[in-house]
Image (spheres, rainbow, N blue to C red):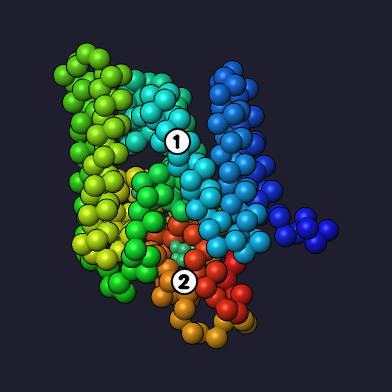
Amino acid sequence: MKILKKYTGPLVMFLVFEAIAVALWLTMDNLFYLFNFSYIGISIAIGLALFENKYRHARRVTQLLVGLYMLVYLGLICNENMQIEGFWYYLFSGVFEAATIHYAVAKIFGPVFFGRGWCGYACWTAMVLDLLPYKRPPKERKKLGFLRYITFGLSLAFVAALFLLNVHNKDRIMFWSFLAGNALYYFSGITLAFALRDNRAFCKYLCPITVFLKPASYYSLLRVKVDKSKCVSCGTCSRVCPMNVDIMDPSRKRVNGTECILCMECAAACKKDAIRF
Ligand code: SF4
Ligand code: SF4
């Protein structure tokens, strides 16, 4: 019984993804979805189970399992553009598969249930950024959040232009734009991290996907909270948070509340075991 209680989180996450896997497999009549979402569910469950066992790099394990799978297998080998341009491309093509399903599950509707879990456990851009030296960001954030709307608009305009100008070989262009887009993301993400001494600066200011992620994650069922009966107000959790979330405030309106990536760095650092989902 104790074991079941300990592993409830990983088990629930696995079952949620398994339900999505089976539902999409049957409705789309495509075995790929069963494999894809089962693999992601297992990867997340492994990371959560390792976290329950206080393994320091638990989240990194999931980040690598999911991030490399998406970047290398889906992106480079299967030629699926899972960047935001790929989402626009499939959307404008009227096709509900691949990137559109990925976005619906991970970035548009999913965050209502698991917030920005995508950013903490699956994004292949952040998978690299998290290895950089500035894990604890400066206390004050820059007022650069408007940049994300510019990158969002540019990605939309780029794909819209391909359709409006009736460009041929769109499939090939999308593959090359996947390579170019990733190179650009890594270059700007690493440059920003060093310039602002903040590994997650790209996520805070530039990433276009946050335009989808932030509003939905405001309503997230899964939230990190402080148990006030255990908390001694030492402030450690706020200092280690890579996203500058005001975790002491339990309300949904807390400062940078929609930035929480559920990384649990705050929980791992808390000596009083006062932070849980
Ligand atoms: S904000 Fe963007 S780059 Fe950062 S983890 Fe989320 S999706 Fe990835
Ligand atoms: S509040 Fe905790 S879980 Fe959320 S981003 Fe900050 S450290 Fe990670």
Q: Would residue 39 appear left or right of 254 to someone viewing this image?
A: right
Tag 2 residue: 247
Rounded to the nearest angstrom, the CA distance separating label 2 from label 1 is 31 Å
- Please, what is the three-letter code of the amino acid marked with disc 2? Ile
Residue 226 shows up from this direction: no
Q: In the rendered view, would you say 29 is above or below 10?
A: above
Q: Please say whether residue 57 is visible from this viewpoint.
A: yes
Q: Within 10 angstroms of label 2, few (less than 14), some, or many (20 or more) residues?
A: many
Residue sitting at the far right: 1
Q: Nearer the viewer, residue 201 or 23?
A: 201
Q: On the image, numbered disc 1 is attached to which residue?
A: 70
Please give left or right for residue 174 compared with residue 260 in the image. left
Tell me the residue at 62%/56% (across/down). Answer: 50
Query: Is disc 2's CB within 8 Å of ligand 2?
Result: yes
Quarter of the N terminus within the rendering: bottom right
Horizontal placement of 199 versus 221: left or right? left
Q: Name which residue lies at 22% across and 13% down.
A: 168
Asked whether mark 1 and ligand 1 are closer than 8 Å, the reply comes as no
* Side of 26 where 185 appears, left or right: left
Whichever of labels 2 and 1 marks the residue nearer the N terminus, that label is 1
Q: Which mark is residue 175?
A: none
Residue 126's spot in the image, x, y percent?
38, 50
